[in-house]
Image (cartoon, grey):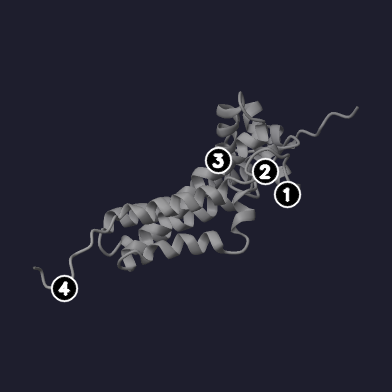
């Protein structure tokens, strides 16, 4: 007869925390992601993606025929791609907004990876759950705004930083991708340089394109 004082090892299913996180994330992201017209501050974001979709010109997004240099173009490019792929089934603004789903998933995975490197057991689960419970994140992740891509990029950079001590090459790579990817720093800086240099020459085709005023009716 086995000793009642001995404890038998209990098999732990390590997939349960991941399944729990995925279920909570789906319930968190699904409501109001589609099925409604753009909210108040989504108009300009959808307009930029829509103009890219119509014109096919993706270096510098335009709004009302004028270059929009305030934000980097990556998020609007992704929104235009999502709208193009899903437009047979959804409205264009719903299709563009759906790009937030993989960006939010990327953010949660990066947070989980960073927390798993620092915390033992299943405590890593608290990091993505705290993100989901934070005030303002639900509202931001359900709007067509560049903040979603920026948050995803910075969490990827954070995961790369946390893992850099164990895997320097991979950590440095993901730090660079996370910090530079959402901004597309090279493209944005190059485009701004072109705009400044070409505006000095009235003969430049780029300057003529940027300085063209709408035709009067």
Choose mark 3 or mark 2, whichever is in front: 3
| Residue that mark 2 sits on | 45
Choose mark 4 or mark 2, whichever is in front: 4
- The disc, 4 or 1, on the residue closer to the chain's N-terminal end is 4
- Seen as rendered, the residue at the extreme bottom is 5
Contact (Cβ within 8 Å) of mark 4 with mark 3: no
- The disc, 4 or 3, on the residue closer to the chain's N-terminal end is 4
Contact (Cβ within 8 Å) of mark 3 with mark 2: no
Q: Residues within 10 Å of mark 4 (few under 14, many from 20)?
A: few
The span from disc 2 to disc 1 (Cα, nearest Å) is 8 Å
- The disc, 4 or 2, on the residue closer to the chain's N-terminal end is 4
Contact (Cβ within 8 Å) of mark 4 with mark 2: no
The circle drawn on residue 74 is none
| Residue that mark 4 sits on | 4
Q: Secondary structure at mark 2?
A: helix
From the viewer's perspective, is residue 151 above or below residue 67? below
* Quadrant where the N terminus is found in the figure: bottom left
Q: Secondary structure at mark 1?
A: helix
From the viewer's perspective, tell me whether residue 119 is left or right of residue 96.
left
Q: Is 99 in front, or is 201?
A: 99
| Residue that mark 1 sits on | 41
Q: Residues within 10 Å of mark 2 (few under 14, many from 20)?
A: many
- The disc, 1 or 3, on the residue closer to the chain's N-terminal end is 1
Residue located 55% across and 40% down the image: 99
Contact (Cβ within 8 Å) of mark 1 with mark 3: no
Q: Is 112 in front, or is 56?
A: 112
Q: Secondary structure at mark 3?
A: loop
Residue located 57% across and 64% down the image: 134
Q: Is 173 in front, or is 137?
A: 137
| Residue that mark 3 sits on | 99
Residue 203 in the image: x percent, y percent? Answer: 68, 32
Contact (Cβ within 8 Å) of mark 2 with mark 1: yes
């Amino acid at each position: 007869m086995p000793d009642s004082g001995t404890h038998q090892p209990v098999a732990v299913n390590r997939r349960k925390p991941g399944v729990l996180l995925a279920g909570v994330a789906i319930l968190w992201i699904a409501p109001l992601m589609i099925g409604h017209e753009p909210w108040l501050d989504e108009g300009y974001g959808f307009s930029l993606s829509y103009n890219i979709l119509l014109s096919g010109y993706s270096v510098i997004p335009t709004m009302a025929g004028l270059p929009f240099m305030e934000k980097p173009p990556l998020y609007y490019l992704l929104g235009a791609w999502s709208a193009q792929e899903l437009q047979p089934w959804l409205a264009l603004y719903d299709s563009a907004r759906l790009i937030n789903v993989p960006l939010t998933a990327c953010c949660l995975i990066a947070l989980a990876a960073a927390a798993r490197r620092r915390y033992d057991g299943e405590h890593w689960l608290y990091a993505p759950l705290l993100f989901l419970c934070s005030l303002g994140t639900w509202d931001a992740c359900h709007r067509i705004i560049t903040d979603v891509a920026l948050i995803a990029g910075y969490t990827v950079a954070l995961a790369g930083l946390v893992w850099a001590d164990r895997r320097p090459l991979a950590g440095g790579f993901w730090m660079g991708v996370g910090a530079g990817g959402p901004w597309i720093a090279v493209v944005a800086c190059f485009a701004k340089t072109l705009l400044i240099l070409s505006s000095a020459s009235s003969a430049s085709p780029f300057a003529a394109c940027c300085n063209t005023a709408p035709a009067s009716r």
